[in-house]
Amino acid sequence: MSDYTISLVPSVSRYAFAEIAVDDILKWLVSKDIVKAELSECTLGNLGYAFSDGAQYIVFEPHFLPHQLDINGLEITTERTIFNTGQNGIDRIVCPNCTENIVDNEWDLDPWYQGFTDNLLCPICGTESNIHQYVFEPQWGFSNLGFTFWNWPELKPEFIVELQEKLNCDLVVVGSHI
């Protein structure tokens, strides 16, 4: 069996005070009994927060919560990360300037990842634009903050909106298959 994730990622490359936001969001999630307060080995590669009984209220199909899996938690990222779709790949990357699909051209995310810029250079028109102005299909996320739910069923929109309000910014939803 393979794993899948749902990542909620701010639509900003540099979320100010990410560590403070994480503390506030974690306290909120624990108070709603969505995740356990203790770190555990419930994600791949990093420690995370295992789901708790309240998680059933923020997903569409609570009977699909990963009770039987060891990988079943919330991983919180506070470093610059490209949240991609894993095996789901990428079909289109549309430049906001020339509106061309650049997916088959040589585009370079390394300057963004290294923190040199918040932009992506279009290999067709040569214009640099904020990476969040590009259209990625399926959706990718680019930020120093992200909330990744391992093997959880689809999250309810009300929960995503509430998290957006707490973070005071738009979020993108990135689904990944590993």
Image: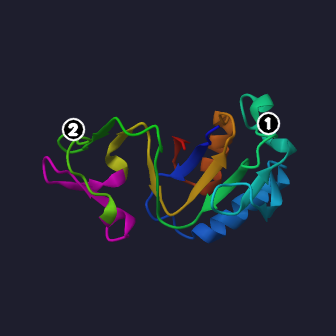
Q: Could you tell me residue 159's position as x and y percent?
A: 68, 41
Relative horizontal placement of residue 91, taking residue 7 as reference (left or right): left
From the viewer's side, name the closer residue of 53 and 164: 53
Residue, disc 1: 57
- SS state under label 1: helix
Say if the magenta span includes residue 126: yes
Near mark 2 (Cα within 10 A), the count class, few <14, some 14-19 or many ≥20, is some
Q: Indicate which disc residue 153 carries.
A: none
Give the answer, above or below, for where 114 lies relative to 82: below
Picture quadrant where residue 26 is located: bottom right
Residue type beneath disc 2: Thr
From the viewer's side, name the closer residue of 130 and 142: 142
Q: Residue at x 64, y 55 (%)?
A: 44
Near mark 1 (Cα within 10 A), the count class, few <14, some 14-19 or many ≥20, is some
Residue at the farthest front position = 1
Q: Residue at x 75, y 57 (%)?
A: 49
From the viewer's side, name the closer residue of 82 and 66: 66
Residue at the farthest left position = 125
| Magenta segment | 111-131
Q: Could you tell me residue 46's position as x and y percent?
A: 65, 63
Q: Residue at x 60, y 48 (%)?
A: 164
Q: Could you tell me residue 60's position as x and y percent?
A: 71, 29
Relative horizontal placement of residue 30, taking residue 142 as reference (left or right): right
Relative horizontal placement of residue 144, taking residue 151 as reference (left or right): left
Residue, disc 2: 99
Residue type beneath disc 1: Tyr
Colour scheme: rainbow
- SS state under label 2: loop
Picture quadrant where residue 69 is located: top right
Say if the magenta span includes residue 88: no
